Image (cartoon, rainbow, N blue to C red):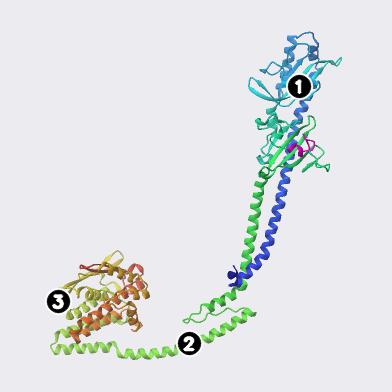
């Protein structure tokens, strides 16, 4: 990290400025998250308390309605007359049951209305219960002698088991206050549980239960908990609630971990770890029952995760924006230094020093002015050196041109041709005439492209010279589409390939060999192929040739072995000593000239000349491939196929051109 910072002024400034801005921003984000989490918890408590208040209002309505109904029934004259009679009056009994049934049917939360007379056996009931004996809860209430609410208990009727809570109230005579019997109005726990169901309480994760004065669960959405003590499921919870069963006090006169208001409602924190939850409670003053709602902390965690994600996104976007702004500002400040550093580290001796845009008058601007003055001085010195070298090279070129003037060569060869004819040396005359035509086409007045017909004529002149040197050694077949004769192609492509076939393929075999030149159209391209039936190449040698052709120019010259065993580097060095203006074609021409010279001078040096020609031909093959790639692209590269003892085939494909580009 230290090394990474030490190598860049921009990085140092960026880290310092970014740290001074990002750290306070992260602290602000954490503070906002903590405050938002607390607000979320308080909001959940407030919402839950409002829902408990609404549930308590619904429960109070039911209880007050049952209370009012009980007062109405115990003072009803017909009921008083029925209960004070000496015996059970069937007609009055039926009439009273009908009235009670209508009352019970009008209120869905009333499961049953029952009257237990004391003077005679029997029971008036609006529900058909299978148990004929007195319920255990009724016996407890009768024993108490006063109005009371029972706990939750199960009654079996025609629809199955039904959980109810019953208000037991003594019926007394309106004349002498003598007890005539008992009134029992049963509250349906199922209807009461519907009041406790709220998908919005704790956002669906909370649960509300009704707890009796003795701590048993009177109503719950989980029916398996009915009638069971709350302590079985939440040990110590009631001790935290002020006024609850086994309420606990820590000695300071205040409830533990609770907030209480005057209406007997509040909240406490219960549990630890994953079981931690917020408990909201509210007491019902009519019965002293208590609504207890639990909201697990997982709900807070879910909301806190959302708040954390939102806060992280906001802080992240802010950090990213600050980072980009810091990066842009620091980059703009350090850009001149980077430009100057880049100019100094990438100095190219072949190019002038790039000018530094010094637009300011500060220290960086003055440094840029000094750099520009240094660059101008160096450029002036380079121009002076280049002018001196150019004058020297021009003098050398003029001397060379004077030595190899084409007209001088043509006139000299023409004179030799006529002298040979006059002396009766027909073979020498033909060879000189072919060489003269060969050189004239090779120079081509300095143009790089020529018609196909001229390129074929150039091969014919080359073959004419070589056939005199190697009589009865080879034959050449021309298969050229006549429609391509007037099309244009890059000059001096075929001669190196024919020379390579002659020197390396035909010359080393026994008997007469054949070289075939095939030029045929294919669509918009011209396919050119040079084939021979010489010795061919082994698979390993063919692989080396293909690899050499696939290498770049510099590497290829070093990797490509030659027939004489001379390394490619030597070939490159030899080629580098030639004139650059004619470097692409000089090896082939030099090869032909050297071969011809060797033939005329002495037939005894044929082996040495063949070896030298093989070296030049190998360089010429690579030279042809490079020229094809340079002028026509990768699709025009040479393709070499060969079989040992059968021959070699070299081909390429170039676009058909109507004229010289």
Residue 528 in percent (x, y) is at: 27, 69
Q: Residue at x 75, y 28 (%)?
A: 62
Residue 240 in magenta?
A: yes
As drawn, 174 above or below 642:
above
Q: Which residue is mark 3?
A: 472
Please indicate whether residue 51 sits to the left or right of residue 445 in the image.
Answer: right
Magenta segment: 236-247
Crowding at mark 1 (Cα within 10 Å: few <14, some 14-19, many 20+): few
Q: Which residue is mark 2?
A: 383
Contact, mark 3 vs mark 1 (Cβ under 8 Å) = no
Q: Quadrant of residue 490?
A: bottom left
State which mark lies toward you, 2 or 1: 1
Q: Which residue is mark 1?
A: 140
Labels 3 and 1: the sequence-earlier one: 1
Real-space Cα distance between discs 2 and 3? 59 Å
Extreme residue in the left direction: 424
Residue 430 in percent (x, y) is at: 17, 83
């Amino acid at each position: 990290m230290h090394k990474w910072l030490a190598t860049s002024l921009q990085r140092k400034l960026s880290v310092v400025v970014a740290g001074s801005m990002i750290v306070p921003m992260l602290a602000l984000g954490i503070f906002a998250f903590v405050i938002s989490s607390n607000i979320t918890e308080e909001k959940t408590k407030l919402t839950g308390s409002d829902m408990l208040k609404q549930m308590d209002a619904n429960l109070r309505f039911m209880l007050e309605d049952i209370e009012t109904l009980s007062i109405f029934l115990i003072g009803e004259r017909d009921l008083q007359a029925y209960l004070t009679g000496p015996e059970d009056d069937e007609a009055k009994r039926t009439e009273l049951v009908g009235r009670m049934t209508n009352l019970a049917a009008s209120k869905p939360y009333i499961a049953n209305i029952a009257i237990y007379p004391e003077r005679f056996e029997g029971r008036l009931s609006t529900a058909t219960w299978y148990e004929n004996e007195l319920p255990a809860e009724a016996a407890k209430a009768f024993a108490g002698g006063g109005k009371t609410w029972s706990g939750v208990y199960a009654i079996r009727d025609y629809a199955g088991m039904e959980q109810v809570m019953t208000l037991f109230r003594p019926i007394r005579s309106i004349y002498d206050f003598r007890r005539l019997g008992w009134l029992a109005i049963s509250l349906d726990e199922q209807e009461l549980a519907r009041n406790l169901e709220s998908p919005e309480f704790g956002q669906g994760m909370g649960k509300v239960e009704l707890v009796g004065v003795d701590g048993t669960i009177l109503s719950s959405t989980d029916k398996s908990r009915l009638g069971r003590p709350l302590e079985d499921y939440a040990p110590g919870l009631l001790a935290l609630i002020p006024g609850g069963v086994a309420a606990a006090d820590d000695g300071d006169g205040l409830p533990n971990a609770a907030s209480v208001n005057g209406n007997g409602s509040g909240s406490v924190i219960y549990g630890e770890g994953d079981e931690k939850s917020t408990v909201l409670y509210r007491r019902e003053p009519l019965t002293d029952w208590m609504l207890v709602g639990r909201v697990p902390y997982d709900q807070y965690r879910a909301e806190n995760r959302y708040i954390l994600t939102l806060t992280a996104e906001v802080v992240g976007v802010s950090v990213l924006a600050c980072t980009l702004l810091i990066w842009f500002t620091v980059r703009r400040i350090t850009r001149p230094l980077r430009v100057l550093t880049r100019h100094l580290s990438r100095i190219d001796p072949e190019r002038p020093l790039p000018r530094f845009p010094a637009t300011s008058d500060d220290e960086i601007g003055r440094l840029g002015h000094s750099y520009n003055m240094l660059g101008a001085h160096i450029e002036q010195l380079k121009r002076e050196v280049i002018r001196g070298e150019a004058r020297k090279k021009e003098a050398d070129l003029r001397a060379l041109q004077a030595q190899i003037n084409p007209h001088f060569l043509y006139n000299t060869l023409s004179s030799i041709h006529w002298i040979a004819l006059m002396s009766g040396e027909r073979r020498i005359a033909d060879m000189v005439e072919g060489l003269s035509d060969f050189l004239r086409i090779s120079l081509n007045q300095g143009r790089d492209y020529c018609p196909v017909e001229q390129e074929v004529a150039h091969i014919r002149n080359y073959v004419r010279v070589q056939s005199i040197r190697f009589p009865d050694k080879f034959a050449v077949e021309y298969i050229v589409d006549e429609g391509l004769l007037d099309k244009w192609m890059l000059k001096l492509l075929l001669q190196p390939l024919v020379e390579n076939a002659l020197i390396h393929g035909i010359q080393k075999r026994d008997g007469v060999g054949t070289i075939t030149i095939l030029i045929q159209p294919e669509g918009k391209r011209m396919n050119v192929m040079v084939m021979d039936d010489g010795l061919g190449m082994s698979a390993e040698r063919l692989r080396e040739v293909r690899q050499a052709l696939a290498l770049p120019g510099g590497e290829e010259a070093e990797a490509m072995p030659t027939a004489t065993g001379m390394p490619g580097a030597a070939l490159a060095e030899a080629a580098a000593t030639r004139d650059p203006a004619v470097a692409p074609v000089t090896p082939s021409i030099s090869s032909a000239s050297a071969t011809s010279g060797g033939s005329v001078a002495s037939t005894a040096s044929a082996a040495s000349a063949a070896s030298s020609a093989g070296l030049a031909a190998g360089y010429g093959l690579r030279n042809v491939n490079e020229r094809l790639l340079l002028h026509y692209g990768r699709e025009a590269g040479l393709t070499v196929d060969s079989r040992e003892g059968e021959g070699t085939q070299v081909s390429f494909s170039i676009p058909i051109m109507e004229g010289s580009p």
